[in-house]
Image (cartoon, coloured by chain):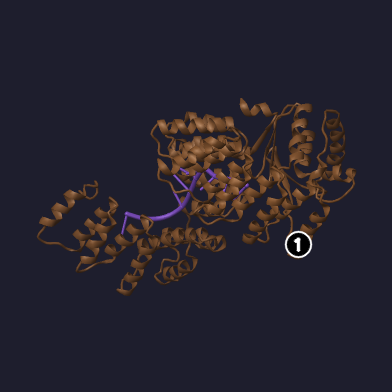
Chain colours: A brown, B purple
DNA sequence: GTAGGGTTAG
């Protein structure tokens, strides 16, 4: 009883005066130690035990794994096996959780054999743990096979399947599975919603996200901080910052994750000042920021050009909160310095930081070289990127872009030759948007869309109209040495322009247009969209890999 | 006594 209520001291005193101490009383005490997180105490008692049973082993294996001492947990499981004990469903689900935590696929497969041998091949709980393990280790297929072979499914099994697809990036499948789950008569719960909503964020399908928000309210899951955080993020990533704010303000259970989520949402929409204000309020409210909070905050600072503020927070993170900066935090600082034009400081930061660099941090500096047109540094930095990832098409393109903007066609063709030799292919730009719950997708110069001819002639008219309003195509961005007319044509067929043309043709006047893109939008499209938004009197919101841009611009400061 | 989830740099 004392153990159950976490009063370990009382439990220990009682145990010490007990005349007869058996396995059961010792097991209870071990669980007491584990309940309060005293792993050393539990281990000591365990080591001193004259006899043990399966429950004893289960207690320590599960205890260690619960506190993420996964390796220790797996070692204990091996010892258990050597001692001649057969694992039961409790042992196996704990051990599989440990494998998932370590992403240890091979050990996981061995445990799978053990599961089958011990007769738990069709067990509901063990089956979900097994599928979860496979999916966490990146083997979605094996995980799905386990779930599909289960004779009965419950909500947890469905959630495992859905979360596995979400975490492995199969967002469309997540939405399909969500419908199937409901059709099979299962009621989604807070965990289902977290996975499904994060897939909506990924796909930026606002319509679906809104429908799922309705389901959240219907099932009463809207009082869960986890669901709230995902909703905030979903609305932000789907382009509706105002709805993120509404969810956040209405929420009574917001925790540090929800606050971080809101800070990230502001950052994603370029609202640096609000992000900083919210962080300061969070501190005043006594909520402890974590590494992700700082990542979101530093990101917001770098995108809004708050260089000094960002550097200040970077120091605060370590000094006040004892959070060691990881490579992602350093990347934000490199971005912050790079955008501000301090290229040398930025490079020095990478070379002197105590954590190992990666392709991304060097790519960040490479983008800064492009913004500030520093071709010499760009060449050097591109080499560093390609050391980490020789197949990274974006870096070759960036480097070629810098050469093209200097009209140094010889260097451009050199870069293109290296790409050919190394068989590097440029990732095609794809934009998509949702109209009446249907997703339309466009690739550059795409002829696949049924309305491609109409789009083509509409784009021609639109470009002419834009030129009357001061649009000058920035042909320096085209990588090939073509004549100007060809360059303009190539620019006007960027996927985001095609998507916007399609939306203008197929939606009523005044409807906001939300376009998503798989790469960064180019500066020509940025200028072009601004002008389109003005002449067509439409709010246009473009999401690329990094952030949201809203047009007209003033919307950002509302 | 067991299983499934949240915010995040480019």
Residue A480 seen anywhere in this rendered image of the structure: yes
Residue A81 x %, y %: 34, 72
Residue A184 x %, y %: 54, 49
Q: In terms of image quadrants, where is residue A498?
A: top right
The C terminus of chain A sits in image quarter: top right
Q: In terms of image quadrants, where is residue A121?
A: bottom left
Check disc 1: other Cα within 10 Å, few if <14, some if 14-19, many if 20+.
few
Residue A228 seen anywhere in this rendered image of the structure: no
Mark 1: secondary structure: helix
Residue A460 x %, y %: 87, 37
- Vertical side of A86 occupied by A445: above or below: above
Q: Between residue A31 and residue A297, name the one nearer to us.
A: A297
Q: Residue at the location (74% across, 40% down)?
A: A523
Q: Residue at the location (66% across, 26% down)?
A: A554
Residue beneath label 1, please?
A418
Q: Between residue A330 and residue A512, name the one nearer to us.
A: A330
Q: Residue at the location (74% across, 64% down)?
A: A423
Number of numbered discs visible in the structure rendering: 1
Q: Residue at the location (73% across, 26% down)?
A: A510
């Amino acid at each position: 009883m004392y153990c159950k209520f976490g009063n370990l001291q009382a439990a220990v005193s009682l145990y010490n005066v007990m005349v007869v101490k058996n396995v059961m009383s010792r097991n209870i005490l071990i669980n007491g130690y584990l309940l309060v997180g005293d792993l050393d105490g539990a281990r000591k008692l365990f080591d001193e035990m004259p006899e043990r049973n399966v429950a004893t082993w289960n207690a320590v294996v599960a205890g260690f794994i619960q506190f993420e001492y996964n390796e220790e947990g797996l070692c204990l499981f091996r010892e258990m096996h050597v001692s001649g004990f057969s694992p039961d469903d409790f042992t196996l689900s704990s051990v599989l959780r440990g494998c998932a935590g370590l992403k240890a696929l091979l050990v996981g497969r061995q445990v799978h054999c053990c599961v089958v041998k011990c007769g738990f091949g069709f067990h509901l709980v063990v089956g979900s743990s097994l599928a979860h393990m496979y999916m966490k280790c990146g083997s979605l297929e094996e995980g799905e096979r386990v779930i599909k072979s289960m004779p009965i499914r419950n909500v947890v099994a469905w959630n495992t399947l859905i979360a596995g697809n979400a975490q492995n990036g199969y967002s469309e499948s997540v939405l399909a599975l969500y419908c199937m789950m409901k059709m099979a008569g299962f009621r989604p719960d807070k965990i289902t919603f977290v996975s499904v909503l994060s897939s909506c964020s990924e796909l930026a399908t606002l319509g679906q996200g809104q429908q799922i928000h309705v389901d959240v309210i219907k099932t009463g899951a809207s009082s869960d901080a986890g669901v709230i955080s995902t909703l905030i993020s979903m609305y932000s990533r789907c382009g509706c910052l105002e709805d993120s704010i509404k969810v956040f303000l209405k929420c009574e259970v917001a925790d540090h994750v929800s606050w971080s989520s809101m800070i990230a949402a502001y950052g994603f929409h370029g609202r640096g000042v609000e992000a900083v204000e919210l962080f300061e309020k969070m501190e005043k409210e006594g909520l402890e920021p974590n590494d992700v909070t700082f990542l979101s905050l530093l990101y917001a600072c770098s995108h809004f050009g708050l260089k000094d503020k960002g550097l200040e927070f970077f120091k605060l993170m370590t000094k006040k909160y004892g959070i060691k900066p990881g490579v992602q935090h350093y990347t934000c600082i490199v971005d912050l310095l790079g955008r501000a034009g301090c290229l040398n400081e930025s490079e020095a930061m990478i070379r002197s930081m105590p954590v190992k660099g990666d392709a991304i941090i060097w790519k960040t500096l490479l983008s800064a070289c492009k913004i500030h047109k520093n071709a010499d540094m760009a060449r050097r930095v591109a080499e560093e990127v390609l050391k980490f990832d020789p197949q990274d098409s974006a870096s070759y393109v960036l480097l070629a872009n810098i050469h093209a903007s200097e009209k140094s066609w010889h260097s451009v063709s050199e870069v293109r030759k290296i790409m050919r030799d190394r068989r590097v292919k440029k990732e095609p730009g794809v934009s998509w948007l949702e109209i009446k719950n249907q997703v339309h997708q466009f690739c550059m110069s795409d002829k696949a869309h049924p309305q491609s001819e109409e789009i083509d002639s509409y784009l021609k008219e639109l470009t002419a109209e834009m030129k009357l309003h001061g649009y000058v195509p920035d042909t320096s961005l085209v990588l090939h040495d073509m004549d100007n007319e060809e360059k303009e044509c190539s620019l006007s067929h960027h996927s985001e322009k095609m998507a916007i043309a399609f939306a203008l043709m197929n939606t009523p006047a005044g409807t906001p247009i939300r376009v998503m893109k798989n790469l960064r939008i180019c500066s020509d499209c940025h200028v072009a969209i601004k002008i389109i938004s003005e002449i067509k009197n439409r709010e246009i919101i473009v999401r690329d890999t990094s952030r949201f841009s809203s047009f007209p611009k003033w919307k950002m400061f509302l």
